Amino acid sequence: MITASTGSQYAGILGIGSYRPRRAVPNSEILEQIDSSDEWIQTRSGIKERRWASEDETVLMMSVNAAKEALQDSGIDPSEIGCVIVATVTHLYQTPAIATRIAVEVGAPTAAAFDISAACAGFCYGVAMANDLVRGGSAKYVLAIGVERLSDITDRTDRGTAFIFADGAGAAIVGPTDEPGIGPVVWGSDGTQHQVISQKESWQEVHGNHNWPHLTMDGNPVFRWASFEMAKAAQKALDVAGVKAEQLDLFVPHQANMRITDAMRRTLKLPEHVKVARDIERQGNTSAASIPLAITAMREAGEAKSGDLALIIGFGAGLVYAAQVIRLP
Amino acid sequence: MASTEEIRSNLAEIVNEIAGIPVEDVQLDKSFTDDLDVDSLSMVEVVVAAEEKFDVKIPDDEVKNLKTVGDAVAFIERAQNG
Ligand SMILES: CC(C)(COP(=O)(O)OP(=O)(O)OC[C@H]1O[C@@H](n2cnc3c(N)ncnc32)[C@H](O)[C@@H]1OP(=O)(O)O)[C@@H](O)C(=O)NCCC(=O)NCCS
């Protein structure tokens, strides 16, 4: 007979942290390289400025800062972290996983550690896995990070993407709780649409020449999918968690585009009192990092507080998505 | 079968909900982009809402041909009859 693992009956998010790069890049700087206007960018995306990482603000550095803030927020000793999950598409090493180095830097040097590739759904994928690891008994505490330096893979001359993507990191500590703190995940993918947001060429294809494989995106179908299909997934996440829209305090969708957020809010018919994350205005689209960045911004602004019920949903290249209801630490 | 006027008025409500345009401004001769300030992203929303409301399919390639409210109403009428 093999002994099966046993975990905690319930898990929840015990701490959240983020790292925002120092340098704010206004639309005027983007306009130096694309034919567009401040007005177009603002009306089509809601973005006024974004943060781009400087040289020293590496994927490692931003992650470690966000993770330390989350650890402090949770009050958990880093040595108790049993697993580190890092969601990113911009750690530009195929191997080893950046999670292993982050584990060392935050003080959990022997924790299980790996990276996941789930694009803008990465944070929600990480939280879903962390929840199951804690409940399944594979780790007592899990550090889940979403981090991107999208400025590294963005074509600054591409009108369809140059103004959208940005950099940053966010982290959550997931651990055992007395009450359910993370609702069932509603997730999935649609690989038939893999080409609508993707790296342009494979490493194989650019091997031997000096082309850099940037991101490409066909924005219009992405907008349609995100605004409507994702509103349905978000509704399902509420339903399976047994939470009514009236009970929600916050709606924190991936900060892809303000127009997607507005369309989802309309489709979901969220009551007026539900506060909606709008961090994209100052931060741009930071993919896997955008949800924890938005939550910490709402906390700092006094819009979010401990105990609040939040509906979170990540969605992006793949097309992958994940949504769940969480209680804020 | 819905009359032209019924379709126009239902469509006007959709445009009002999505783009905040007064329903009485949404007339057959009005251009979505030039007269009603419905940009390409709002148009995507209008199309999806119209597909649901009128139980029709409006293919992506077709959307760029729907320049005026009249174009959209005519397309929906044809699709419903077809
Ligand atoms: C990128 C996005 C803002 C583009 O908006 P869009 O309305 O789909 O843009 P289109 O490509 O259909 O172009 C519409 C018009 O704007 C123009 N345009 C496109 N990019 C432009 C730019 N950067 N500046 C000014 N005008 C631009 C086009 O030329 C076109 O003009 P025309 O109608 O006169 O021909 C939008 O599709 C989007 O945000 N999609 C979702 C993307 C997203 O969030 N991705 C992340 C998911 S993780």
Image: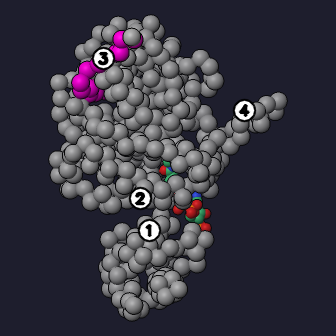
Discs 2 and 4 carry the same chain letter:
yes
Inter-mark Cα distance, 2 to 4: 33 Å
Query: Where is the N terminus of chain A found, in terms of image quarters?
Result: top left
Please say whether residue A12 is one of the residues in the magenta stretch.
yes
- Mark closest to the chain's N terminus, 3 or 2: 3
Disc 4: which residue: A203
Instruction: Describe the element under mark 2 as helix, strand or loop.
Output: helix
Inter-mark Cα distance, 2 to 1: 8 Å
Which of pointers 3 and 1 indicates the residue nearer the eye? Answer: 3
| Callout 4 amino acid | Trp
| Callout 2 amino acid | Phe
Residue B2 in view, yes or no: yes
Inter-mark Cα distance, 3 to 4: 42 Å
Q: Is mark 1 within 8 Å of ligand 1?
A: no
* Circles 3, 2 touching at the beta carbon (< 8 Å): no
Residue B64 in view, yes or no: no
Disc 2: which residue: A228
Disc 3: which residue: A6
Between A217 and A58, the residue placed more toward the observer is A217
Which of the 4 quarters of the picture holds residue A322?
top left
Q: Which residues are magenta?
A: A2-16
Disc 1: which residue: B48
* Circles 3, 1 touching at the beta carbon (< 8 Å): no
Discs 2 and 1 carry the same chain letter:
no
Does residue A235 sit above or below B61 in this rendering? above
Instruction: Describe the element under mark 4 as helix, strand or loop.
Output: helix
Inter-mark Cα distance, 1 to 4: 37 Å
